[in-house]
Amino acid sequence: MIPRYSRPDMVAIWSPETKFRIWYEIEAHACDAMADLGVIPRENAEAVWKAKDVEFDVARIDEIEAVTKHDVIAFLTHLAEHVGSEEARFVHQGMTSSDVLDTCLNVQLTRAADLLIADLEGLLAALKRRAIEHKDTIRIGRSHGIHAEPTTMGLTFARFYAEMDRNLSRMRDARAEIATGAISGAVGTFANIDPRVEEHVCDQLGLVPEPISTQVIPRDRHAAFFATLGVIASSIENIAIEIRHMQRTEVLEGAEFFSMGQKGSSAMPHKKNPVLTENLTGLARMVRAAVIPAMENVALWHERDISHSSVERMIGPDATITLDFALARLTGVIDKMLIFPENMIENMNKFPGLVMSQRVLLALTQAGVSREDAYAMVQRNALKVWEHRTDFKEELLADPDVTAALSPEEIEEKFDLGYHTKHVDTIFARVFGE
């Protein structure tokens, strides 16, 4: 992933240096376990740990790989250069390359998941704070982009909180599912390595043994992991699009913070564009782009092939780095987001009283008017408001069919905004707890 959309902690997980360090730890812990079982001499296992403080030379490993055309062999050759060829002769005993590659990948994915979990927790804190702040800030709800009925800005933030809270649970589940390791040898039968070696290595690396591997860890686990990233990305886009809509000039109910010295357009100095949330929409597309390849990786030939390998070398870093950046960016947007309550009320009143149409419809039916007649009575008055910007309440009061069923006081009562917010506390208790 390009530096523009990267944060250092997540990038570090995918660096060659980190990868080779994990490879080394897998091999060293495996040697320890084999020594405990009497398979290799204890002194050889201890010799491998002589390299525990070594900074592995990425350029040297690449140089060896240019000859061997095999990355794990290149690494093992370089390790022997530090440990000594005689001392290192039992390294990788009974193992296959996928034991190292797959176990390492899952270590990296669990570490990436830990950062993403922390990101989600930070975003949830920001959403909760803004929800409480604007619990009673009235705004118009919209369906199909058209004014519907009143809601509150706090409920909008609470809705996004609940969605991201579900995503936090999904991310934790995805982490648990991907946290497996395999040290089972060629085709996964443990023919040349004791299963207790796998148990020891996994324990040391914070993983659990894969119940049954072939020569690879099953890729349905990875498909579920990247699918979770894709769902989270879609939720980010869901929030971003709402903010982009709110910042439109003719809406302007909320906006991204515009910093001192910031420029919106190279041509038009008046512009304040929602560039951060537009960027989040694009980043979400890139994260979701990893989902289908991850699912296509599930179907491999027999006990293994490497059709998944090139895919994972790209989507592993790119999807996690991008999502990490996007979550942090969204948290910043929510934290600093500007809210304009006066514009919310002004927008709602562009067609005075029109958003109370359902209350009048229900009142007419409760007064004995058939639903079909009540709907026709309300709609014909509502259309006058649409066409002439008149006041909906005044139109109703002037309609003899309406006033025959409802008194002026009953009509007036149907325009109380508080009616629409009376259950906000109940919803908040469901979302945030009592």
Image (cartoon, rainbow, N blue to C red):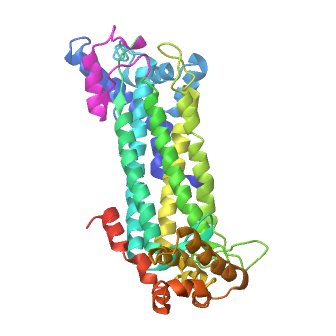
Task: Return the residue nearer the eye: 425 or 200.
Answer: 425
Task: Name the residue located 65 percent from the left edge and 73 percent from the top edge.
Answer: 248
Q: Can residue 11 be seen in this view?
A: no
Q: Please tell me in which quadrant of the rendered image residue 376 appears.
A: bottom right
**Position of the N terminus by quadrant:** top right
Q: Tell me if residue 259 comes above or below residue 91 in the rendering.
A: below
Q: Give coordinates of residue 48: x percent, y percent.
A: 32, 24
Residue occupying the point 21% across, 14% down: 37
Residue 165 lies in the magenta-colored region: no
Count of marks, rendered view: 0
x and y percent of residue 63 in the render?
58, 25
Asked whether residue 115 appears in the rendered view, the answer is: yes
Residue 332 located left or right of residue 63? left
Which residue sits at x=46%, y=91%?
409
Q: Using residue 36 as the reference point, say whether residue 209 is left or right of it.
A: right
* Residue 33 % position (x, y): 25, 20
What residue is at 47 percent from the left and 14 percent from the top? 303
Does 205 sit left or right of 231 as displayed? Answer: left
Residue range in magenta is 187-216
Q: Where is residue 84 in the image (x, y as percent from the top left)?
A: 38, 19
Image quadrant holding the C terminus, namely: bottom left
Foreground residue among 191 and 117 = 117
